[in-house]
Image (cartoon, helix red, strand yellow):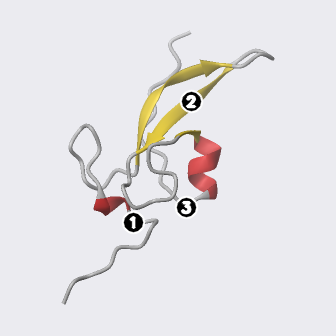
Amino acid sequence: MEENSSPHDPSDGPSPEGNPREAAVFLGWQPLPTGGEVPLYNVVARRHPLYGSTVTDATLVKHDLPVPPTPPNGK
């Protein structure tokens, strides 16, 4: 019997780094018009409604996706 994946299951699509458990990958830091920067991520869980979207960490949390390791801001 075939097992169905939840749309929030990150195991249904490998990330560019090849880790099938990652739901998103870190892209970089986006400067804000008010100052500071926000980290951005690409959603790589293929069956998730946000697949292919570039989002913030707040959006990942809102959609029950784990926030991947994020390097410190280089500034």
**Residue shown at the point (39%, 61%) measured from the top left:** 47
Q: In the rendered image, which residue does mark 1 sit on?
A: 9
Q: Point out the tag, 2 or 1, that comes first from the N-terminus.
A: 1
Q: In the rendered image, which residue does mark 3 sit on?
A: 64
Identify the mark at residue 30; answer none if there is no mark.
none
Q: In the rendered image, which residue does mark 2 sit on?
A: 39
The alpha-carbon separation of the residues under discs 1 and 3 comes to: 9 Å
Q: Is residue 69 above or below residue 3?
A: above
Compared across the picture, whether 23 is left or right of 54 comes to left
The alpha-carbon separation of the residues under discs 2 and 1 comes to: 22 Å
Which percent across, then down, holds residue 66?
A: 47, 53
**Residue shown at the point (38%, 54%) measured from the top left:** 45
* Tag 1–tag 3 contact (CB < 8 Å): no
Q: What is the quadrant of the C terminus in the image?
A: top right
Q: Is mark 1 on a helix, strand or loop?
A: loop
Q: Point out the tag, 2 or 3, that comes first from the N-terminus.
A: 2
